[in-house]
Image (cartoon, rainbow, N blue to C red):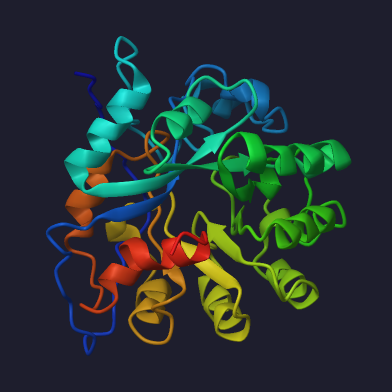
Amino acid sequence: MARIVGRLASPRQPAETDPKLARMPMPENPRAFDTMLGTPSNRDSWQKEFTHVKDAASGDLKHPAGYMFKDLPEVDGTVDYVDYLIFEMDRWGVDKGLINVAFGDTYGTRAVQTHPDRLYGLYLIDPNKGMNDIRALERATKELGVIAAGCFPSGTNPQVDINGKQMYPFYAKCCELNIPIFVNAGVPGPRMRMMAQHVMHLDEVCYDFPELTIVTRHGGEPWEDLLVKLMLKWPGLHYSTSAFAPKHFPKAIINYANTRGADKVLYAGYFPSGLSLERIFTELRNAPFKDEVWPKFLRENAMRVLRLS
């Protein structure tokens, strides 16, 4: 059987919550929907994709944010990854998941086609490709099992802001296709410029596209308080916990989920890119969510946002 080795070390401070909010244990059978599953990473070639990372020290890292992710999960290449992914999902109580797919890819499309009741496709857009990628997104919804779009604004080259003019046709297409878009927000982990992902950009997009469902990824830090304000303001704006070990979930997000935002916060992992499911679900047992928040956080919000309810 394939194995995952190594653990994630992160400098983030543990999340704290209002002591008045009761901590309830995670359900024994979580039946989680993981809105960020991935495929095996080539630890030695990511630099070819992100050529706008310029500092010499990053060239030796095995992950674009390897200065934070010290010990990375490694997938045993002798075992079929799709089979192993399902094994790990079953082992840790993940019932369904969202996984990147692309035309001609190695794992994602096959995973969705082999397990259509458990795995669903996300198509990662490149706004610099314009109409070619808009057509590809629509085609992917018909041919690859895609039910969501995704974008890493700081990772685009040239960078395109969340509210950049190149993004607007993609937002319009998502509205037309009735699918959500997952967008990285906050300071990016890789050593690239951050302003493309400033949380304030979301305000303009939500204003211009009131029908659009947006789910942020990768934390929104250091503007998580602003992100909470925007989620209170805009019905279509949501948050997912991708790339954060549960003990580092931001305080503002936990408090929001436990109060007015129970329908707005979605579980997302980071397997196998940076976090093992073992670590995530071991730490998740101590996450201070209220009893009534757990089923929404783990599953129900994702099912609704992805139009699977």
Residue that appears at 57% across and 24% down: 46
Residue that appears at 53% across and 37% down: 100
Count of labels in the image:
0
Q: Nearer the viewer, residue 71 or 151?
A: 151
Most distant residue in the bottom direction = 20
The percent position of residue 17, horizontal first and vertical second, equals 29, 78
Q: In this view, does 274 lie above or below 114?
A: below
Q: Which of 266 and 175 is in front in this view?
A: 175
The percent position of residue 106, horizontal first and vertical second, equals 52, 19
Q: Can residue 192 be seen in this view?
A: no
Quadrant of the frame with the C terminus: bottom left
The percent position of residue 66, horizontal first and vertical second, equals 46, 34
Q: In this view, does 6 lie to the left or right of 194?
A: left
Q: In this view, does 234 lie above or below 266?
A: below
Q: Which of 11 and 72 is in front in this view?
A: 72
Q: In which quarter of the image is residue 73?
A: top left
Q: Is residue 239 left or right of residue 97?
A: right
The percent position of residue 250, horizontal first and vertical second, equals 39, 67
